[in-house]
Image: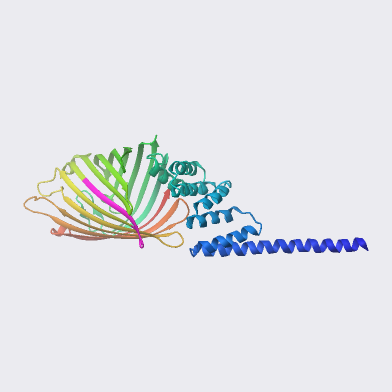
Amino acid sequence: MGITILLSMFRKLVFGFFIFILFVNTSYAGNFETGIKLFKATKYKQAVKQFHRAEAAGVKKTSLYYNLAVSYFKLANYKKAKKYFLITSKDAKFAQLSQYNLGLVALKQKKKKLALKRFLRASSTAGDPRITAIANKQIDKLKLGKGVQAADGGMSVTYGNDSNVLLLTDDSPSRKSDNYIESYLYGGVRLGNAYRLSGSWYQRNYSVVNSGDYSVLQVKGDYLFAIGDWKVEPGVAFSNSQFGSRDYLDTLDLNIVAKRRMDAGRVVLRYRYSDIGARDSIYNYLAGSRQQARMDYYTKTDIGRLRYRYQLELNSRENRATKNYSPTRHDFRLRLRKKLADNWKLKLDAQYRFSNYSAAAGVVRKDTRLRMVAGLGYRLNRQWTITGRVINTNNDSNLISEDYARTDWQLYTQLTF
């Protein structure tokens, strides 16, 4: 009889234990999910309460501590944010992201040396290449050149339809429509903290209008240093190109880039001097020099990321007796990039350019060009993106032969690594 009573009590105890575990797990799940919803609604104080209730339920999960850390960071309670990021940094799955966030915490606490240490750990820890990239950007702000990835690169393949193939040798329309395949491959390596070597290859092949085919191979070297708040990077590049089935141009570029961050955005200044030679004597009229001076301003707004650009271009080519190939150009551009839901990104670009040519055979040419670009991209995963884009160009010229409209439809995929 006593044994029967003991067995009955044991069964009740076991049943009660499982009911308790079920209650704890249900309570944890409810509090955690409620906390996530409150966090997404930017109600961080309420989210913290829910996360702590889940913690009090007895379940110790890294995802819970990570959400607590981020919530405290949003509340500017950096001491507690650091406490929980340190906990999550011990989990291999969260290690890289936690080190990056610990760097952000250190920056908020104005501990730049500690921040640099945390970002360096995030950069060197295996994991998501996107976290590596943003960690490198933070490092580069604190110590020039330290945060640039040792090697990077990418490739893209495009299928498009061009309603009016542009013949580059004359910068004139062919009045012919054609499909094409476009390929682009690039890569670079950093030598030490300042020197960088890179290269690229580009090719566009038309299905029918083969005289519009174009390819170019380029190698480039740059050196990075700082002057006050400016990051300065001079460099030299050499490229050779082919147009249709013929050798086209050899180009030696001397360029310098200067960048500076400001409270509201970022300024980038560029200057390029190009010495251009003809690889085939039939293109001797294009030999000479080109100068380009550009200013870009990047800023974040409520509607997305904006880039304002102005570029001045001066050309001094050999020219022909009946045609001038040395325009002076003023180029104004505005670009908007906006992240949409579920890995979608919108890109809009508007360009207005006017070109003046010196007289040739008594004729003075003046062009104005308006180009509009609209693109919608989707990120498939960390490296792959697929994008649809349409480019509409209207060139108004006082010469009938140079007056044209052009629409270019593109579908391309891009891989970065």
* Image point (46%, 61%), residue name: 342
Q: Position of residue 337 (x, y in %)?
A: 36, 58
Which residues lie in the magenta part? 292-305
- Relative to 1, say whether 115 is above or below: above
Quarter of the picture containing the N terminus is bottom right
Residue 341 lies left or right of residue 32; in this view the side is left
* Image point (51%, 49%), residue name: 97
Q: Position of residue 104 (x, y in %)?
A: 46, 49
- What kind of secondary structure does the magenta stretch mostly adopt? strand
Residue 344 lies left or right of residue 407; in this view the side is right
- Relative to 162, say whether 320 is above or below: above
400 and 92: which one is in front?
92
Q: Position of residue 112 (x, y in %)?
A: 43, 43
Q: Quadrant of residue 389?
A: bottom left
Residue 297 counted in the magenta span: yes
Does any portion of residue 207 appear in the rendered image?
no
87 and 153: which one is in front?
87
Does any portion of residue 320 appear in the rendered image?
yes
* Image point (39%, 50%), residue name: 156
Q: Position of residue 159 (x, y in %)?
A: 36, 55
